Image (spheres, helix red, strand yellow):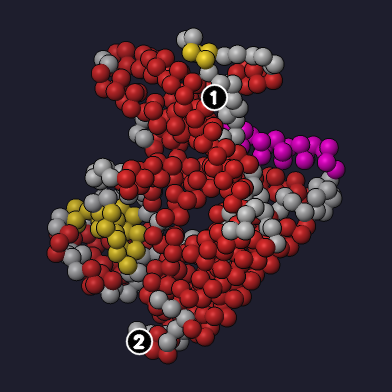
Amino acid sequence: MADNKQIAADVLAAVGGKENVRSVQHCMTRLRFNLVDASVVDDEAVKGVRGAMGVAKQGGQYQVVIGTNVPEVYNEIISLAGLAAEEAVDENLDAVGEKAPFTPKAVLDNVLNYLSGSVVPLIPVLVGGALFKTLAAVFGPTLLNLVPEDSHFIFLCNMVYNAAFYFMPIIAGFAAAQKLGTNGFLGAFMGAILIEPSFVALQGVEGAGFSVYGIPAPINGYAQTLIPVLLCVAAMAPINKFLNSKMPASVRTIFAPFITMVIMMPIAMCLLAPLGDYIGKGISGFFFWLAGTPLGFLAVTVIAALWPALVMTGMHVGMAAIALADYASTGTDTMLLLAATVQAFTVSGVALAVWLRMRDPEQKNLTLGYFITQFVGGVGEPLLYGVFLRYKRPWIASIIGGAASGLYAAFTGVVLYTPVQGIFSPLSFLGGDTANMINGCIAIAIGMIVSFAVAWFTALTPAQMEGKE
C-alpha cells in the first residue's frame, strides 16, 4: 500500500517546502499547488518522488498527479504544511481565469471548454435516465420477457427515461449558466421557455404562426436538445452580468432577470434557438452519414485506437461533449461514444498483463490499484500516468487492442444505447436486439484479450519488471 505520509513529505520537499506553498487544493487525481515561486521547482525531482506520476502546469497552478489516493496525500500535506484545507475542485476548471491570446485555436478551446463544462455535468442524468431504459429492455419483451410491454413497470422506466431527456434544455441551461458564472436558475428558466407546453403545442397546429415583438419566429421542437439552450445561455450570461453590474442592489433582484429576458426573447426565439436546432440536426446528420459511409468503420477504429491518448491530452472532453449532445437528441450512438466504450477494457487488459509480469513489489501493488480503478470505475488517468507514460511501450498494446475492438464493433453494426463506464460497460448495448448486446460484448472482449496478449510480450523490458527503470 502507498505510504501517503511519505509521499506527502517528499512532494512537499520537492516543490520547495511549506514556505513555497501559498495554498493547495486537490481534484480527483491531482494535488494543485499555488506556489510562491514556481521557478525554483525541479520538475524532474517531483516526478522522481515515489507515488507521483507526473506534473502539469495549468490555471496558474503547479499540479502533481498522484492518483486515486490523492485525498489521503492531500490531508497529510495539509497537516505537514499547516495549511487550511479546501474543498475538492472540478477537473474542468483549469482554464478559468486564464487569458489566452485571441487566436482561432484560443476561440476553439474556449468553445470546447464551454461545451464540455456545460454538458459533462449532465452525464449522471443521462446515464441515470438511460439505465431505466436498460431495465425496460432487460425485463421487458426485448430480452427476458418477464413483464409485458403495457405494464406499469415498463411505463415507469419509460417515464424516467423521457424525463431525463425531454427536459434536457432546463438541466443544460442551469449547468451552462453556472459555467459562465451567472445565475444557474436563470439558465434553467431559459431552457424552460424553449419547451413551454403551449409553444410546443403549436407544432401540431396546421398553419400556426408565432412571432416575438412582431418578428417571425420558427416553431421548432427544442425538447431533448442541447445546442439551442447552450447558444441562448451564452448570449444571456453577459447581458445579465452587465445589468447586475449597473443596477442598484435595491432593484437588481427583480429587474435584472426581467430585463435580461425582455432582451433575450427575440435573440433566443428568432435567432439562436433555431440556429442551434439546425446545428444539432447537422451534427447528428453528419455522424449518421459518416457511420453509413465506407469510412464509418475506419472512424470508429481510429477513435477506439487513440482514445487513451485523447484522454491523456484532454482532447476527449470536447469531443465527448459534442457526441453527448448528439446522443441526447437521438438516444443512440454509433461513432464516438461507441468507440470509447468498446475500447474501455483495452487499457485494463494492458494493466492486467503489466501487473502479472511485474516483479517489483511496490510497482506491482500500484499497478493492481490502477487496474481496479479503471476496470471497476472507468477512471483511467492513474493508469495512463502510472503505467503508460512511465513505461511507454504499453501504448502499442492499447492501440492494437483498441483498433481491433473498434473494427469489430463497426463491422457488426453495434449501437450504443446507454453511455455506461467501468465494469457495467456491457449494459451500454442493451436496448436493441440480442445480437447487438452479444456483438458489443464481443467487441469489448476482443479489445481486452488482444491488448493483454500484446502487452504480455511487449509492455515491459526485463529491467522494468524488476523496478530498475
Can you identify the residue that label 2 sits on? 468
Q: Looking at the image, which residue is at 55% across and 54% down?
A: 336
Can you identify the residue that label 1 sits on? 194
16 or 39, nearer to the observer:
39
Q: Which residues are magenta?
A: 148-167
Res 422 seen here? no
In the image: residue 125, left or right of residue 100: right
328 or 29, nearer to the observer:
328
In the image: residue 192, left or right of residue 294: left
Marked residue nearer the N-terminal end (1 or 2): 1
Q: Residues within 10 Å of mark 2 (few under 14, many from 20)?
A: few
Pinpoint residue 22: horizontal percent, then vertical percent.
19, 53
In the image: residue 277, left or right of residue 163: left
Q: Looking at the image, which residue is at 40% across and 45% down?
A: 112
Q: Amino acid at mark 1?
A: Leu
Q: Residues within 10 Å of mark 1 (few under 14, many from 20)?
A: many
Nearer the camera: disc 1 or disc 2: 1
